[in-house]
Amino acid sequence: MRPRAVLASAGTLGLALAAAVSPAGAADGTPTTPTQLFNGYRHCSTDADRPSYRQAGEGLVVEGVPGGTGSTGSPLVGVRYQAWPVGDPTRITTVTRDHATPGFEAPATLPASALADGQTYAWQARTEAGEAVSDWSAPCYVTIDNTRPANAPVVTSPNYAPGVWNEGGEPVEFTLDAGGVDDVEGFEFSWQPDLPVIGTSIGDHGIPRPVDPYADTRYFKRAGALGGSATLSLVPPSGSGPMTLYVRSLDRAYNGSAIARYDFNVGSTAPSVTPAVPEPGFGEPTGFTLRPDPGLQAKSPVVSYSVRTTGGQEDKTLEVAAGADGTAVVELALDGIYHQSVQVTSKSANGWVSDEAQWYISYDTTPTVASDTYPENGSGGGAGVPGTFTFAPKVKDVVSYTYTFNDGEPPVTVPADADHTARVDWAPATDGWYDLTVHATTRSGIQLAPYDYFFTVN
């Protein structure tokens, strides 16, 4: 697949060859020479020694903005384009765009059959209004290149060898070589197999906005010389594990070679995460000490940590600055009603981001439920026989309990006593099997995990 995208349609070009006639009822003013000349949505080159290189397997779009002065009739004009091989100016191919609007791009397509691969062409444009015509524009020069680089690039790294586990902590140095292809201008690379497409947007008045892809250093690097090599210094997208860099060569027309890949492995550089107490209490602020991987710290000091919590009431990500020795302390109050995890990555001064350290804790926040009359998973009492159920917390600061006997019944909430327990008196209407579901709520409004208490009424 060629690394280019054309963001304009050729379907409405109104192409005509050689004997096209200017539109009837055209403007009766003085036509002016087209400006804003583009070929293949890139700027035209008026330097015969430095032509633009374009792929033209499906023809070459040429365009310019026509103009005119003193028009009193219809504003429509025509634009005529003619092209010829620089080595044979007598072989002229002509195309026109009829019914063009002055001030807007008027594209037409030079047919692929008239453009030989590897040949350099000159082309120029003029505006036509009835019998009146403008001067021809200065010639633009373009070399047709329909051939992708024959070889994939050669990718090597002096500090991260393939096929072995490398110690992480410093950017990966890559050398990208054209692999003997003498017209390679640069390289496109990515940590993902789908490399970005080179595109051109279209601006006001239909004027293309070509950009130099090599200005985007995230994905492109120009070779030091045509057919030469380039070097990269990249931090992998994740701190450890198998890594792959995908690279292809680009010629001057942005034809892309086959994709080469460089596979290598990076060992873990994850920090350590240690709470001040082995099992922090539910919702209790606890300090966590973050320490860098020693090998990582030796290569480039850790300057910060990214700390992310998951499974809590309001998960969040914190950025924590490291001290001179690379350590840091962060205070967390963990409130996941079942379990919660803390994920930490470190960032070094050289930009290296470690892989993730993970710390987990599980909480049982269900209440305890007890009844002498109606024991759990047993039978007792009877229809109309009252029993007392006692609810007690497993975490601190419980202020109420919400319960229901059997699904579908309206829930009832009762406040907790000073000792954070509650007692409920209840008498069943009928005998049979019952499910008492209870959950507690804390002072801060956290609804804790529910507990199901099963029993049978005699």
Image: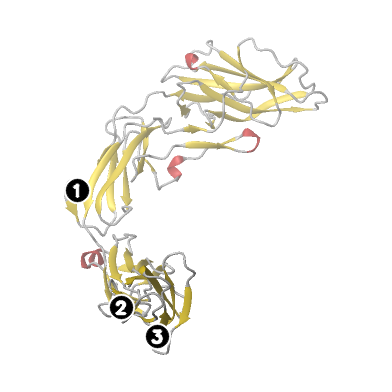
Q: Is any part of residue 449 visible from this angle?
A: no
Q: Amino acid at mark 2?
A: Pro
The percent coordinates of residue 52 (x first, y second) are 48, 29
**Nearest to N terminus: mark 1 or mark 3:** 1
Residue ID for mark 3: 420
Left or right, residue 65 beside residue 233: right
Helix, strand or loop for disc 1:
loop
Return the residue nearer the eye: 353 or 73.
Answer: 353
Helix, strand or loop for disc 2:
loop
Residue ID for mark 2: 280
Q: Quadrant of the N terminus?
A: top left
Helix, strand or loop for disc 3:
loop
Judged by depth in the image, the label closer to the viewer, 1 or 3, is 3
Q: Quadrant of the C terminus?
A: bottom left
The percent coordinates of residue 43 (x first, y second) are 54, 32
- Residue 161's label in the rendered image is 1
Q: Amino acid at mark 1?
A: Ala
